[in-house]
Amino acid sequence: MMKNMFYLLGVLLSLDGYTQTGIGTTSPVNKFQVETTAAAPLTSGSGFNGNLRLGATGANQVLDFGLGTTFGWLQARHKTIYSENYFLALNPNGGNVGINKSNPAKALDVTGDIAVSGALTGGNLVASKLSGFVSNITSISAGRDLSLSDNGTILRSTATSGITIGLPASGIPEGFNCMLLQSDIGQITFSGTFYNRNGFNKTAGRYSILTILYAGGIYIVSGEMSN
């Protein structure tokens, strides 16, 4: 016990305004610096992994900090079962969080692009809204098949003669939707199996707008159309 106290006293005395303290390095650049082996957070086991750990007496959850080969990480997890993870809360009592932004105006304020690989779900079925967004517009001048990358976009045809848009029989997910605009004189014909109220298969003419929706395993193509 006495040995630990003297060790702690020595550490505290070294943390003055003129000294840098290093663990794993003899030449720390900052006031306190830890150097260790770079490694991604483990998903199993319980061995050494990371640079720094915060834990609580009697609790299984810990917050580990580390550095991978190309990224930094923090992971809330079980202290001995790395396959068991815990929630990570940022400002749980309030306050905004900024990424590349030092004066966030919203709960999460991000400067730059955001990519989401899973679902984006609103927290309130009545009040949750999307605002301030515009659709991506893809210009086409020749016929082609729809692709997954067309989901949620506006296809703007600048063709001056007729073209055909194919509706593929596979590879398109449930809920796929896009808008198509015939912005020039080239009429657009649709190929594949699809449905609408009048059995139309072409755009009605220049400046026609229509929607393509894949729902219930079928395509619905509807809007300003003709044969």
Image (cartoon, grey):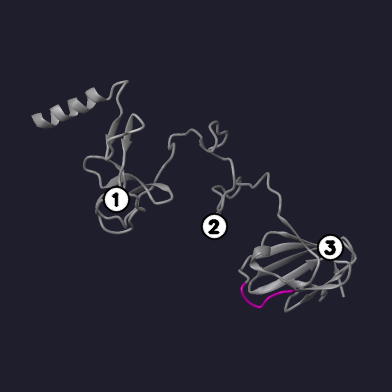
Determine whether the residue tagged by mark 1 lies in a helix, strand or loop: loop
Q: Position of residue 52 (x, y in %)?
A: 30, 42
The answer to whether 95 is drawn above or below residue 59 in the figure is: above
Q: Nearer the viewer, residue 103 or 129?
A: 103
- Which residue shows up at 24% across the image and 53% down it? 47
What's the magenta region? 166-171
The residue labelled by disc 3 is: 158
Q: Which percent across, then down, holds residue 163?
A: 83, 72
Q: Earlier in the sequence, mark 3 or mark 1?
A: 1
Q: From the image, state whether disc 1 or disc 2 is nearer to you.
A: 1
The kind of residue tagged 1 is: Asn
**Quick one: quadrant of the C terminus?**
bottom right
- Secondary structure of the residue carrying tag 2 is loop
- Left/right placement of residue 177 relative to residue 181 reads left
- Is the magenta region chiefly helix, strand or loop? loop
Expressed as whole percent of the image width and height from the top left, the position of residue 141 reads 81, 66
Amino acid type shown at disc 2: Ala
* Quarter of the image where the N terminus is located: top left
Which residue is denoted by mark 2 in the rendering? 119
Q: Is residue 169 magenta?
A: yes
> Disc 3 versus disc 2: distance between alpha carbons?
33 Å
Amino acid carrying label 3: it is Thr
As helix, strand or loop, the secondary structure at mark 3 comes to: loop
At horizontal 61% and vertical 45% (from top left) the residue drawn is 127
Q: Nearer the viewer, residue 156 or 14?
A: 14
Q: Nearer the viewer, mark 3 or mark 2?
A: 3
